[in-house]
Image (tube, rainbow, N blue to C red):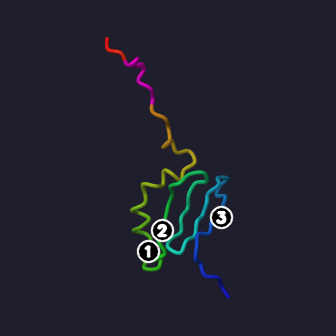
Amino acid sequence: MTTKLERELKREITIDGTAYTVTLSPVSITLVLKGRRKGLEINWVDLVSGEAALATALNASLVANLSPNADSHAKPQASGKISSGRKP
């Protein structure tokens, strides 16, 4: 007998030496680079109805967040100007 999925279930998985978190919820499955908040998410309804490919294509912009080498969190460069708050 199986257990109903009534709340989130999180597990860590290692793929090619990189740690990811898989979250199973009653609504969806999510794959996120460990330590990050955003990743790929597929709703169960989309998966069952065959719309998973479409849902994945729409979430393609999140792929950068799954890459451990992604430079999406780079800090902006300083302009070099320092303001003292006084008028010249």
Name the amino acid type tagged 1.
Answer: Asp
Q: Residue at x 57, y 48 (%)?
A: 68
The answer to whether 2 is drawn above or below residue 59 in the figure is below
Residue type at numbered disc 3: Arg
Q: Is residue 57 above or below residue 86?
A: below
Instruction: Tell me if residue 20 comes above or below residue 48 in the rendering.
Output: above
Instruction: Please identify the residue farthest to the front as the structure is shown.
Output: 86
Numbered marks: total: 3
Query: Seen from this angle, which residue lies furthest left?
Result: 88
Q: Quadrant of the C terminus?
A: top left
Q: Which residue position is annotated with label 3?
A: 11
Q: Residue furthest bottom?
A: 1
Q: Secondary structure at mark 2?
A: strand
Marks 2 & 1, CB-CB < 8 Å contact: yes
Dividing the picture into quarters, in which one does residue 81 lie?
top left
* Residue in the picture at 52% in, 45% down: 70
Q: What is the spatial separation of the Cα atoms under label 3 and label 1, in whole angstroms? A: 22 Å
> Residue at (41%, 67%) from the top-left corner?
55
Q: Indicate yes or no whether the magenta region holds residue 82.
A: yes
Stretch of the chain drawn in magenta: 77-85
